[in-house]
Image: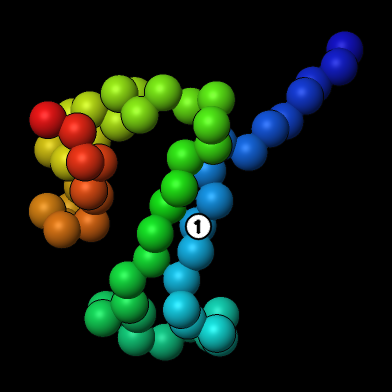
Amino acid sequence: MTCTVAPIALVSSTRKSTEDDFWGGQMSEIRLADHIDPSSLLGLEARERSPRSVRTGLS
C-alpha cells in the first residue's frame, strides 16, 4: 500500500521561538495550498473558540 501525503497549507508567523509560553497576542497566517478550494473553510468560524481566530475572506 502506498500513502501519499501533501501539504494543505503553510503557516507563517513573526514569532521566532517555539518555546511553550504565552502565545495569546501572537498572530499567525495560514495560507492554503493552491489545490485546496477556499470554500472548504466555509462555516469554520462557527467551530472556533475565538471569533477572531479564523478569517476566510469568504462570504
Residue, disc 1: 11
Which residue sits at x=47%, y=81%?
Answer: 15
**Residue lying furthest top:** 1
Question: Who's the residue at 48% across and 27% down the image?
Answer: 36
Name which quarter of the figure residue 39 lies in.
top left
Could you tell me which residue is drawn at 34 percent across and 86 percent down?
A: 22
User: Going 13% across and 38% down the picture, which residue do you hit?
Assistant: 46
Q: Secondary structure at mark 1?
A: strand
The image shows a total of numbered marks equal to: 1
Q: Residues within 10 Å of mark 1 (few under 14, many from 20)?
A: few
Tell me the amino acid under the disc marked 1: Val
Image height check: is 1 above or below 24?
above
Asked whether residue 47 is in view, the answer is: no
Q: From the viewer's perspective, tell me whether residue 54 is left or right of residue 52.
A: right
Classify residue 40 as left or right of residue 10.
left
- Asked whether, in this view, residue 5 is left or right of residue 25, the answer is right
Is the C terminus in the top left, top right, bottom left or bottom right quadrant?
top left
| Position in image of residue 23 (x %, y %) | 35, 80
